[in-house]
Amino acid sequence: MKANDFISAQDITTDELHALFELAKDMKVNRKNYLRSCEGMSLAMIFEKPSLRTRVTFDVGIQQLGGNGIFLGPSDINLGKRESVYDVAKNLERMVDIIMIRTFAHSICTDMADYSKIPIMNGLTDHEHPCQALADYFTMWEIKGELKGKKLTYVGDGNNVAHSLLLLGARLGVDVSVATPKGYEPDIAVVENAKKDAQTFGATIEATNDATAAVAGADAVYTDVWASMGQESEAEERKKIFTPYQVNGALMAKANADAIFLHCLPAHRGEEVTDEVIDSEQSVVFQEAENRLHVQKALMHELLR
Ligand code: CP
Ligand code: NVA
């Protein structure tokens, strides 16, 4: 990879994405061939928000490559309060080889990358969740084959996950449609950037308020929680606004008959998705969760080369 860090879905080119997917696929099948790929390397994992998948897949991932992971929870570093982001970066770059950070403001992640000499990976900020999007499109590629010309429809909040899906999808030639309630659209700058890339790679990008129209022709239907981490106080108000955007059997029926259902998880069953959909044959959410492990191993392998 040309970039030193992976902070945005825009930090990886189309060619690099294809190579990364091939590597992840090989790592998934031939795990034993990579047991010493990152031997002796240390990964610091900074978490300012809770996590199941990100924590486990990064920790297990670096171990499976012969390295080791160090978990730093919210009460360990107390980023920006006990110690400045700059000082944390200047310490860690002398102690570990690579850092993953899950935080609130996206600028904390970019600052960390500016200050440190070692690679920084974004494990979720309020603005993006690029490692998630890698796993999502890798899963779609495993199941659907060539992604160019395929359509992914995201229904729900125009949040961090939606942003990374737009940006990465455009680079893979995927038609991405994001359907949200009015006032909850994805960031306009993200949509514009995705549109620019989509033009280059022959895809289309759409931000709409019409969920039913958006899922027409979809090869994958995706949703995420209505209130993200940090928005807990808005949860009740959002429930009312987002109810028409629930992914249920009736909405899935408007997509292609062989469409897959994706969700980054954790899911709030009965809110953004019904049991009927998440437990259906079309749902591949646990394969998607597992794939976090394989794509992130490939990512660390590339960034540590
Ligand atoms: N999808 C995802 O990032 O899950 P966690 O919040 O559990 O890490
Ligand atoms: N949008 C969600 C994703 C969780 C993986 C959040 O930020 O909480």
Image (cartoon, helix red, strand yellow):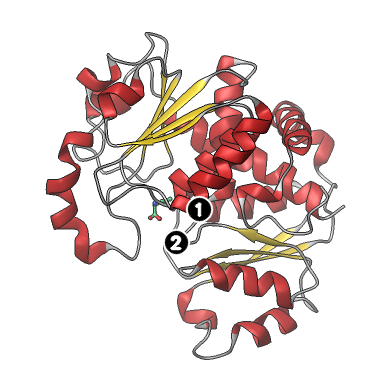
- Which residue is disc 2 drawn over? 126
SS of the residue at dot 2? Answer: loop
Cβ of mark 2 under 8 Å from ligand 2: the answer is: yes
Residue 291 location (% of width, % of height): 58, 35
State whether residue 160 is above or below residue 138: below
State whether residue 209 is above or below residue 84: above
Residue ID at (74%, 51%): 300
Badge 1: residue crowd in 10 Å (few <14, some 14–19, many ≥20): few
State whether residue 32 is above or below residue 47: above
- Which residue is disc 1 drawn over? 189
Residue ID at (73%, 83%): 91
- In depth, the one of 116 and 241 nearer the eye is 241
Residue 29 location (% of width, % of height): 72, 26
Q: From the viewer's perspective, is 177 left or right of 107?
A: left
**In this rendering, the label closer to the viewer, 2 or 1:** 1
Residue ID at (67%, 28%): 201
Q: Are marks 2 and 1 in contact (CB under 8 Å)?
A: no
